[in-house]
Amino acid sequence: MTQPADTVFLIDVDNTLLDNDRVVDDLRAHLEQAFGAESASRYWVALEAMRGELGYVDYLGALQRYRAEESQRGMSDSRLLLMSGFLIDYPFADRLYPGALAALAHLRRHGPTVILSDGDVVFQPRKVQRSGLWDATEGRVLIYVHKEQMLDTIAQCHPAAHYVMIDDKLRILAAMKAIWGPRLTTVFVRQGHYALDAQANAAYAPADVTVERIGDLAHLDFSSSPSSPYSPSSLSSFSNPST
């Protein structure tokens, strides 16, 4: 049995380590350039419909549905067959936030780092791999449909006395905190459109720690011991050095 670590750091991917909003903007521009704004808009309708059905964003699945619907409209365009290549071969390493890898290296000095992401079983692992995050966490990668519902499994895979969850969604952090309580320190990274949605965030309690950028984590002292885990009060007193 794996010896429990003092602390395990769980880190989200999209809009936490990687600027997924820019990836989406690039995909939107590519679709509109290839097929026109009206046709491309139907891809996003298919994407949102599948999000509601599956509970996560399935870019490749939505592309398949989009292709089927466009074919019914009489479009037989071989360029549609190349769209999956745009997604699969996308240079995700270019979309890592500044300081993301340095933050992971800093956290690793205090305990194992684990990618914990929502997503599908094909595209999301590809994103993690091509971005360099797979190697940066030595292959410690967990991807689920609803990660906040998988805490027992996460604890079995990576046992620890204490966990730190780093995410851009207060909803996720609050759900995990409600289950793990003081066993978990939550870190809210205010990046991306979800994190900046003040109306949605108002429904949830603040995280233990809030930072403006993922790179700010490299300036936090995460030193702790099993008998005395992180003190949110000391961590949250962090002053953003870049402002």
Image (tube, rainbow, N blue to C red):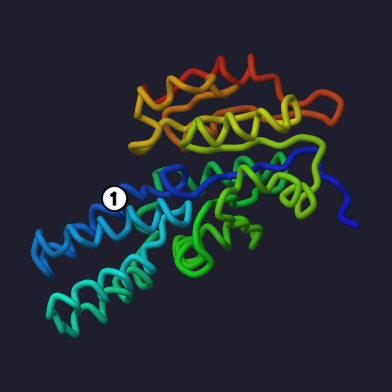
Q: Residues within 10 Å of mark 1 (few under 14, many from 20)?
A: few
Which residue is pictured at 20% across the width and 61% down the height? Answer: 42
Left or right: residue 53 compared with residue 72: right
Quadrant containing the N terminus is bottom right
In the structure shown, which secondary structural element does the residue marked by tag 1 occupy?
A: helix
**Above or below for 203 versus 7:** above
Left or right: residue 153 compared with residue 136: right
Which residue is pictured at 15% across the width and 82% down the height? Answer: 77
What residue type is disc 1 on? Arg
Which residue is pictured at 10% across the width and 59% down the height? Answer: 37
x%, y% of residue 201?
43, 25
Left or right: residue 112 compared with residue 238: right
**Above or below for 107 versus 23:** above
Looking at this view, is 173 or 18 the one in front?
A: 173
Outermost residue, front side: 72
Which residue is pictured at 58% across the width and 62% down the height? Answer: 135
**Above or below for 231 versus 47:** above
Q: How many marks?
A: 1
Outermost residue, right side: 1
x%, y% of residue 158?
76, 51
Looking at this view, is 193 or 102 the one in front?
A: 193
Q: Which residue is mark 1?
A: 22
x%, y% of residue 137?
62, 56
x%, y% of residue 243?
36, 21
